Image (spheres, rainbow, N blue to C red):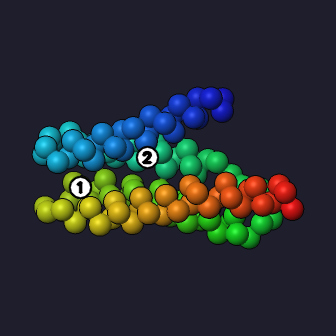
């Protein structure tokens, strides 16, 4: 089952990038591809649980989930906004995801060692 979740997670990430890249061409289906990818990506992140007691990892997980929600909102902004306002939303979501992608493994290693 974990293997299927990883495939969905990776497919969601690929659809995120493809949808955002295709939006530049103004292809009508690009926002829908992005939205599908963001919901797949976000759902898999939300299903991944941390059951430990480390407050730092708990905080980072909340930031990661917030980043996933912002990426989902970006897809809606692609449909609603007439200009490129969605790019700012995408930037915030990507920065949160990037930060937590590096910090969570560091904190897990500290927890394992200590």
Q: Residues within 10 Å of mark 1 (few under 14, many from 20)?
A: many
Q: On the rendered image, what quadrant is the C terminus found in?
A: bottom right
Q: Residue at x 71, y 61 (%)?
A: 107
Q: Which residue is the extreme one toward the right?
A: 114
- Residue that carries the numbered disc 2 in the rendered image: 39
Tell me the element at label 2: helix
Q: Residue at x 44, y 34 (%)?
A: 11
Name the residue carrying label 1: 78
Q: Position of residue 20 (x, y in %)?
A: 27, 47
Q: Which mark is residue 17?
A: none
Foreground residue, 96 or 51? Answer: 96
Looking at the image, residue 90 sits to the left or right of residue 43; the answer is: left
> Given contact means CB atoms under 8 Å apart, are the residues at marks 2 and 1 in contact?
no
Tell me: residue 112, above or below residue 23.
below
> Residue 55, image x and y in percent?
74, 70
Quarter of the image for the N terminus: give it: top right
Q: Quadrant of residue 28?
A: top left
Residue 1 in the figure: left or right of residue 11: right
- Does residue 74 appear left or right of residue 3 in this picture? left
The percent position of residue 43, horizontal first and vertical second, equals 52, 47
Q: Earlier in the sequence, mark 2 or mark 1?
A: 2
Secondary structure beneath label 1:
helix
The residue positioned 57% from the left and 34% from the top of the image is 6
């Amino acid at each position: 089952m974990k293997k299927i979740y990883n495939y969905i997670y990776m497919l969601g990430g690929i659809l995120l990038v493809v949808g955002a890249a295709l939006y530049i061409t103004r292809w009508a289906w690009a926002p829908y591809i992005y939205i599908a990818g963001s919901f797949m990506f976000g759902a898999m992140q939300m299903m991944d649980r941390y059951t430990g007691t480390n407050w730092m990892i708990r905080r980072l997980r909340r930031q990661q989930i917030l980043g996933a929600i912002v990426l989902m909102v970006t897809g809606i902004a692609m449909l609603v906004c007439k200009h490129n306002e969605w790019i700012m939303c995408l930037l915030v979501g990507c920065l949160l995801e990037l930060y937590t992608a590096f910090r969570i493994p560091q904190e897990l290693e500290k927890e394992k060692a200590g």
